[in-house]
Image (cartoon, rainbow, N blue to C red):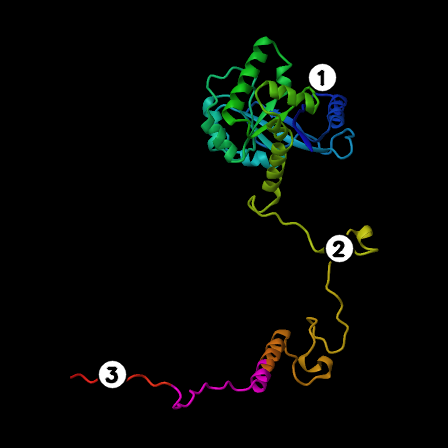
């Protein structure tokens, strides 16, 4: 299963263009897509999700459509409502623009699951391995949008390639999520073409496959657990139930599965028979282990009674024919 977690969305875009992009991504094999709403200004007083659910157009079958928000931050001390923003969307990503915000997103902030940098710009700081690997160990992934390498001028492409190479070198190809970020159908590429591009930029094919499937799936699953589970650890699911015929389809009700019916005579409520009513016996039945021990003991007693007592060896009587020991001569 392939993922594309960055399909840009805007209220001014035409629904027909969005439908074309989603349909083309589905034809290329991307099963899970995320409509991305980017917030560049400060958070409003009342946080709402402007992305309609369901969308106003028809989406292909077996295509999962998520809603995502990307928040641009420059000062991490001014964003105190990130948990409230994360609760409204399915996925929350941060786009730091300064070194202070980047280090805070890697080390301290915990409401997001993605760090999506604008790699077409020149950064005044370097991507060091320690903060990036710390963020990856915390479950945060770094996003690379390959459409930025096709848009813009020569300087933007040069900055994008240099930043991607630096991130791949600092992370050793781990913890990356590759998305399209395409504004139209022209910026979308097939998975094989994306892997070739990543291999040119220094990312191995195995890591490239992880960035298209395993890593984004982990982001989606973790974000779902944060919103549906108990403290992001324990998820409660329904189990041990079956749909009753005639009721499940009409009313949508479920009935818990019961054990086998206990209609036999001489049975208790827990399905066990009484000890004095089993096979008409008055004494309780012994276990197989006790019966085996009793049988073994009886065999040992039987062998002991049938076997003769061992004879004690006796010394033969002393006769005259047997030579006697020579007596020692007396000392003179």
C-beta proximity under 8 Å, tags 3 and 1: no
Instruction: Residue 110: give x, y in percent of width and height.
Output: 51, 35
Per the rendered image, the range of residues in magenta is 300-322
Asked which quadrant contains residue 147, the reply is top right
Q: In the image, is residue 232 above or below residue 273?
A: above
Q: Residue furthest right?
A: 246
Which residue is disc 3 drawn over? 328
Any magenta on residue 302?
A: yes
Q: Which labelled disc corresponds to residue 211? A: none
Q: Which one is nearer the viewer's eye here, 118 or 303?
A: 303
Q: Is residue 214 visible?
A: yes
Which residue is disc 2 drawn over? 242
Q: Earlier in the sequence, mark 3 or mark 1?
A: 1
Instruction: Residue 13: give x, y in percent of width and height.
Output: 71, 21
Q: Earlier in the sequence, mark 2 or mark 3?
A: 2
Q: CA distance from mark 2 to mark 1?
A: 48 Å
Any magenta on residue 331?
A: no
Q: Which one is nearer the viewer's eye here, 240 or 323?
A: 323
Residue at 59 percent across and 25 percent down: it is 204
Q: Is residue 11 visible?
A: no
Which of label 3 and label 1 is nearer to you? 3
Q: CA distance from mark 2 to mark 3?
A: 107 Å
Secondary structure state at the residue bearing disc 2: strand
Instruction: Residue 145: give x, y in percent of width and height.
Output: 62, 22
Considering the image in quadrants, where does the N terminus appear? top right
Magenta stretch, main secondary structure class: loop
Which residue is disc 1 drawn over? 186
């Amino acid at each position: 299963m392939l993922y594309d977690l960055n399909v840009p969305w805007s209220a001014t875009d035409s629904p027909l263009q969005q439908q074309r992009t989603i349909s083309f991504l589905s034809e290329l094999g991307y099963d899970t897509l995320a409509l991305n709403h980017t917030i560049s200004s400060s958070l409003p007083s009342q946080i709402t999700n402007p992305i309609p659910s369901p969308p106003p157009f028809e989406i292909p079958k077996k295509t999962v459509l998520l809603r995502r928000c990307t928040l641009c931050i420059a000062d991490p001390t001014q964003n105190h409502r990130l948990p409230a923003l994360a609760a409204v969307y399915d996925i929350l990503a941060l786009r730091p623009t300064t070194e202070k915000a980047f280090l805070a997103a890697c080390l301290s902030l915990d409401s997001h699951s993605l760090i999506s940098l604008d790699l077409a710009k020149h950064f005044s700081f370097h991507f060091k391995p320690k903060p990036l690997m710390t963020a990856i160990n915390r479950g945060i992934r770094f996003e690379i949008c390959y459409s930025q390498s096709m848009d813009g001028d020569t300087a933007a492409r040069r900055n994008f390639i240099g930043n991607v190479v630096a991130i791949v070198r600092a992370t050793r190809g781990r913890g990356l999520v590759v998305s399209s970020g395409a504004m139209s159908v022209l910026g979308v590429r097939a998975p094989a073409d994306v892997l070739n591009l990543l291999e040119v930029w220094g990312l191995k094919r195995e890591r490239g496959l992880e960035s298209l499937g395993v890593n984004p799936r982990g982001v989606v699953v973790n974000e779902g657990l944060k919103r549906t589970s108990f403290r992001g650890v324990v998820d409660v699911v329904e189990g041990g139930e079956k749909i009753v015929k005639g009721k499940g389809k009409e009313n949508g009700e479920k009935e818990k599965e019961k054990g086998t019916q206990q209609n036999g005579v001489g049975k208790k409520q827990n399905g066990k028979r009484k000890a004095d009513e089993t096979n008409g016996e008055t004494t309780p039945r012994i276990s197989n282990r006790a019966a085996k021990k009793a049988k073994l003991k009886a065999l040992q007693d039987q062998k002991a009674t049938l076997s003769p007592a061992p004879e004690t060896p006796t010394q033969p009587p002393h006769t005259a024919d047997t030579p006697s020991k020579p007596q020692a001569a007396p000392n003179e």
